[in-house]
Amino acid sequence: MNRRHFLKSAAGGTVVLASLPGLGIPLESSLAPGCKFFTPSQAALVGAIAEQIVPADEHPGGKDAGVVFYIDRILSGRLGGFYRDRYERGLRLLEDISHKQFSRSFSSLDADRQTTLLKALESGEAAGSEGRQFFALILQHTMEGYYGDPEHGGNREGASWKMIGFEG
Amino acid sequence: MLNNKVNVVIVGSGAGGGIVAKELASAGLSVVVFERGKMHTASDFNHSELDSQYSVPPAYGPTVYPNPRTFRYTDRETARLVYPGVNDQYGKTAAAVGGGTLAYGGASWRFKREDFRMRSTYGTIPGTSVEDWPISYDDLEPYYEKAEYELGVSGLAGADPFAEPRKKPYPLPPLPINPQGEIVRDAGRRLGWHPFPPPFAILTEFYKGRNFCVQCAWCLAHVCEVDAKSGTQVTMMPLALKTGKCELRTNSFVTRIITDGKGQPTGVQYYDIHKQGHEQYADLIVVACSATESARLLLNSANKFHPRGLGNSSGQVGRNLNDHTGADTYGVFDREIPHDKGPGPSMAFNDWNHSHVPGIPGGGYIYNYYCTLPIEFAQVRPPDAPGWGKAHKDFQRQYFHRYLHLGSNCQALPQEVNCVDLDPHVRDAWGMPVARITHSWGKIDFQIADFVMDKGEQLLKEAGAIKTWRGGNGRGGVNDHQNGTCRMGSDPKTSVVSRYCQSHDIDNLFVTDGSVLVTDGGFNPCLTIQAVAFSAADFIKREWQGSAWRNGKRG
C-alpha cells in the first residue's frame, strides 16, 4: 500500500481512536471538526501559525488552504508517534510564551505580534533549541501542506498551484 | 519450511545484486535473491512530491519501523538514533526490488581514467585513504558497454570531449534538450566550456519491450510511471526470473551468513514477512545490500573463525565509508525559464572534473538539475531571503518560473575513520545490532565542492541570472551514493575483496555493490557499480565451470 492509499483508507475509518489507548490521542469528543488528533484549541493554534507562515492575500493563506488538516493527518497516521509529542509540547510552549508576554492566547494576537513571537521561536531566543526545533518542524509541515498535492489533505483546490502556475 | 540448497544466494536486488542474479541465472545456476523490501511497479507512481523516496516515510522503504541506525560525525561522539526519512543522516536509498535504482534519477556515467588512479594521479593526500583501484578504465570498458546495452542507456557518444574512449555508441539517443538545457549550453559555450547531453538509464525509444520517457516532472525519487527508467526491477530481475532458475524472496531480511564447522559460509539466516526465521543454503554467497548494510551483514556474521566479521581479516570491512558532496548552485532570472519538461537534466559539463587545477584532486561534473516541484522550491532560497511569511510567498510566485538549478556530484576523498560498524547498544527488530555510521567530510572535500560551486555560479551569471547562490553540505552523512566499505584491492591486508569482488579471505563470498568502490569519482556511481557487477558475474561464471565451489568441494 502506498502512502496515498494509506491516507485515503485512514481518512475512511472513524472510530478507531477509542481502540488506541495510551498513545496520547485525545478522546474523539474533544476533537476539532474534521480532525482526528487536534483539539479545537490546538487546531486554532496550528491554523494561526500556518497563516503567518503563508499569509493570505489574493490567494489563500495556510489556514484556509487546509494546512491544519494536512498536519492532523500526519499526527493521527502511522508515523504520528514521531511527532505527536513534539506538537503537543511545542504548541503548549508557544501558548505559554504568548500568555507570559501578552496575557493572551497566540491565536487571538494580531498578525504583527504573532510574527514577532514566531521569529523569536525560530531563532531560539524565545525557547531555546526546543522552540527552534518545533518551529522548523511546523514550518516544514506547513510548506508541505500548502504546496503539496491536494490529495494529502492540504492545498485545498490546488490553490497554491494555481498561484504559482504549476499544472500538477 | 525447508529450503533446498541452491548454487547462489544473493542478498539485495539493487544495482549490483540484480545484475549478478540475471547473469548467473542465465548461465544456469540456481539463484535465490533476498530483498528486504517489496516489489513496486509503475502503478505505485503518484504525481506527488509527498509520495516519493524523499517523503516521510520514504515511499519505497525502508519502513521507519523497525529499521533504525545510529549516526555520529566522529568517533568522539555518542551516536544518536536516526530513522529513514525522518533524519537526513539515515540516507535515502530505497529498500525495495531494484534497490536504489527503483527511484533513481538514472544518471549513468562512466568514470574517467583518473578516477581509477587517484593516488597515482594526485599522490597521497593527508587525512585521506585515497588509493588506486586494482582495475583500470580499460579493464572496465567492455563491462560499461555491456551495462549500457543490457540496461538501456541514452546518450551521445563523442559529445563530451573529456570522456574516455568507447568502442560503441550509446544504444539510445540522448534525452531531448529542454529550454533550461539550451540556456545552459549557450552560456557554457560563451565561457569556452564544452556542453554535452549527459547519459541516462532512461529510454528515449522503445527498447527491449519497455516504453520511452514521457518527460514528466516527477522523476528523481519516484518510480517511473511508464518504466522508462532502467532500474534493475524492470530490467535485470525480470530476466533473471524468466530463466526459471531464480527465485526472488521479497520482504525477507537476511540477518547473518551461516558457516560450517570450518568457518566456511554455507548459506544465510533470514526472516520472512511473518518474522519467521529460516535458513537458505548455497554454494556461493553474494552480498549486495548497499555499502551500509553489506558491511553490517559481514560484521554481524562474525564467528569463532572470523571473530572480526566475515571477510574482515584486514579490519577494513566498514572502513572508508564515502559519499559525494553536492555542489548545487541556484539562480533566479528576470525572464521566464520553463522547467516542466522532465526529467530535467539535459546539458552537462565535464570541464571541472580532473581539470588539474592545483589543490583540487578530482572535482565534479555540472548539469542542469531535475525539474523543481513546488514544495522543493519552497525550501530553496538565497541566504538573505526569508524562509516564510509574505516575502516567501511572493518569492514563490515571482520565481517559480524564473529559476535555474545546477547540480553536481563532487568526488569526496575516502577516510579510514569514516565507517560503518555495529552499534554496541541498539538492536533492530530481529535482535541484530544496527549499523552505526560515523561520517564527516574533510576540509579538502569542501574545497573541491567550493571550487565546483564557483564554476556553477559563473555559469548561471553568464546565463543572465540576476541573483545566484549556492547550496551547502552539512558536516557529513551518507546518502544514495554511499560506497567504499568493502574496497577492492590487490593486497588482502589493506582491502576486502579482489578485483572480481571475491573476498580475499573466503572464496565463496562476494560483494557486488557500491561497497567495493575504492574512490567515488566525480560522477553518479551507478553505472560503475553495474559494470563491476557484470565483471564479477563473468568471473563467477568462468570459475564455476567444473568448480571447486560446487557441492562443497573447494580447492
Image: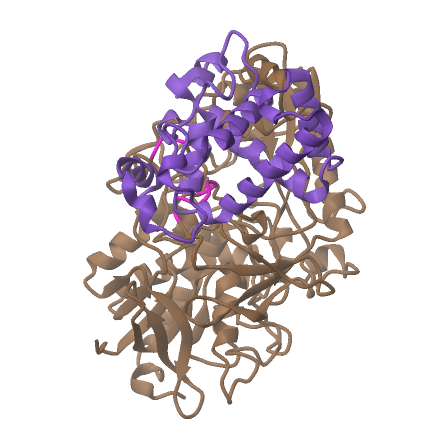
Chain colours: A purple, B brown
- The foreground one among B406 and A143 is A143
- The foreground one among B502 and B195 is B502
B9 relative position to B200: left or right: left
A128 relative position to A46: left or right: right
Q: Position of residue A8 (x, y in %)?
A: 30, 35
Residue that lies at the very extreme toward the top in this rendered image = A58
Based on the picture, tell me whether residue B364 belongs to the magenta stretch. no
Main SS, magenta residues: loop
Residue B372 in view here: no
Q: Quadrant of residue B203?
A: top left
Please report the residue visible at 33 percent of the width from the left and 69 percent of the height from the top. Answer: B271
In the displayed structure, B294 sits above or below B397; it is below
Q: Position of residue B291 (x, y in %)?
A: 52, 61
Residue A21 in view here: yes
A32 relative position to B184: left or right: left
Residue that lies at the very extreme toward the bottom in this rendered image = B261
Please report the residue visible at 32 percent of the width from the left and 72 percent of the height from the top. Answer: B8
In the displayed structure, B205 sits above or below B518; it is above
Q: Position of residue B285 (x, y in %)?
A: 39, 73
- The foreground one among B254 and A22 is A22
B354 relative position to B342: left or right: right
Q: Which residues are magenta?
A: B46-60
